[in-house]
Image (tube, rainbow, N blue to C red):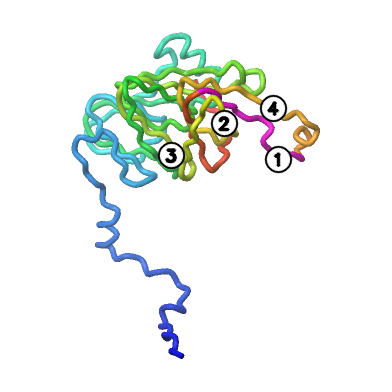
Amino acid sequence: MSTPPSLSASDHDPRPTPSNNLHEFLAATAERDHPGDVFELESDKMLEVHVRGRVWSKLGAMVAYRGNVAFKREGMLEGGMMKALMRAVSSEMEPLTKIEGQGRVYLADSGKNISVLRLTSADALSVNGHDLLAFEDSIQHNIVMHRRMAGWMSGGLFSVTLTGQGLVAITTHGKPLTLRVTPDSPVTTDPNATVAWSANLQPEVTMDTSFRSLTGRGGGESIQMVFRGNGFVVVQPYEEVPQVVQGG
């Protein structure tokens, strides 16, 4: 019988691997440059935006920038009275910032994962307002209230519908999962875990009004979104309760 190999002292050492030296740290965390890309993921939680004109982002998402850029909060009446009304009654729509000029801006949102999507003229995407990080100026955005939900949830459920050609960055807590929706296979989701969906789908609501749910002894999923038709829905492994947006 062969003798098993002996274990070295390092195999028994529970301590973590020592930190990199300064040179190694700088090399591992240095920004990457991909000329021509407007949106570039520096990491799964940091987005670099090459600003050459105008880009839109979530208010407060900037963590650093270089160059000659200016940040202007989206005006309350910008986009017309209907959009202003939608924003005024929604507690879920994060304010937007116009980033204008020439330079590079680095965006992040509470350590959430970032995904970059390229939309074509044939695409239309709905995104929960608090999950929208940034988009190119070539993308049109409209706030949508899902009327079938308005009577069930405080203030209703609002999303942003994005159309046009260009790049969009969305955020998720953890790695997102995309579920296919077909006429014979609808998908039901928790609203607080739902990030985005194909805009042709009109989510409906179901509500568990059983005694166990009302007394807090049920599974906690008393309100669900139901997606029917042909399309997709993106969910995250986290139930994010929207914060009330302060200010006008």
Give the x, y percent position of residue 192.
57, 34
Label 2 amino acid? Answer: Val
Between disc 2 and disc 3, whose residue precedes?
3
Q: Which residue is mark 2?
A: 187
Between disc 2 and disc 4, whose residue precedes?
2
Between disc 1 and disc 3, whose residue precedes?
3
Image quarter for residue 132?
A: top left
Front residue of 100 and 218: 218
Judged by depth in the image, the label closer to the viewer, 4 or 3, is 4
Image quarter for residue 16?
A: bottom left
Label 4 amino acid? Answer: Met
Q: Is residue 199 left or right of residue 40?
A: right
**For residue 58, which numbered disc appears in the image?**
none
Label 3 SS? loop
Q: Which residue is mark 1?
A: 219
Judged by depth in the image, the label closer to the viewer, 1 or 3, is 1
Q: Which residue is mark 4?
A: 207
Residue at (75, 38) in percent of width and height: 216
Give the x, y percent position of residue 178.
47, 36
**For residue 109, which numbered disc appears in the image?**
3
Label 3 amino acid? Answer: Asp
Q: How far apart are the alpha carbons under marks 4 and 3?
A: 31 Å
Query: Which range is magenta?
Result: 217-229
Label 4 SS? strand
Judged by depth in the image, the label closer to the viewer, 2 or 4, is 2
Q: Is residue 108 magenta?
A: no
Give the x, y percent position of residue 33.
21, 44
